[in-house]
Image (cartoon, rainbow, N blue to C red):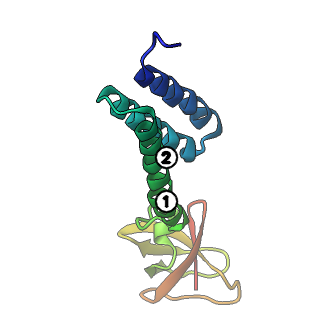
Amino acid sequence: MNDIDAWVWWLVAAAALGIPLVVTAMPEFGMLAVGAVAAATASGLGAGLVPQVLVFAVVSVALIAVVRPIAARHRSQRPQLVTGVEALKGRQAVVLERVDGTGGRVKLAGEIWSARALDSGRSYDVGQEVDVVDIEGATALVI
């Protein structure tokens, strides 16, 4: 054990911490692995055992304290760019062919869509603006 430098043991510890990171997808293990790499660097620069352990602890705790809140905040945010069908919900469309509970046509986002009134008792005449509530397949539900 004395024949192997301490920096090698720190790198072995970093690799060992990388295994549960991959298996469990817990980023804290990655932060501990980065702390071990920092301790290996300190060892390679000639620091003693106590400074190596302090570097490991400080870097690991600092990463966990800084990165976890940022990651939690990003995880809870909704995507700002909405695409596909979700982007069409809430938009306005112009009626091209009378729309009622059985069908019709609207111009939505520059394209012609089949449409159906959400309330089957209502109808919308040509030229009227309607709001898209939902998309079912290739049919826009409007009010």
In three-dimensional space, the C-alpha distance between marks 2 and 1, rounded to whole angstroms, equals 12 Å
- Disc nearer the start of the sequence (2/1): 2
Q: Residue furthest left?
A: 45
Residue 14, image x, y percentages: 49, 30
Quick one: label 2, few (<14), some, or many (20+) residues within 10 Å? some
> Residue 74 or 118: which is nearer the viewer?
74
The image's mark for residue 65 is 1
Could you tell me which quadrant the C terminus lies in? Answer: bottom right
Q: Is residue 51 visible?
A: yes
Give the structural element (helix, strand or loop) at label 2.
Answer: helix
Q: Is residue 84 visible?
A: no
Whether residue 45 is situated above or below residue 138 in the rendered picture: above
Give the residue pinned by disc 2.
Answer: 57
The image's mark for residue 2 is none
Residue 80, image x, y percentages: 42, 68
The residue under label 2 is which amino acid type? Answer: Ala
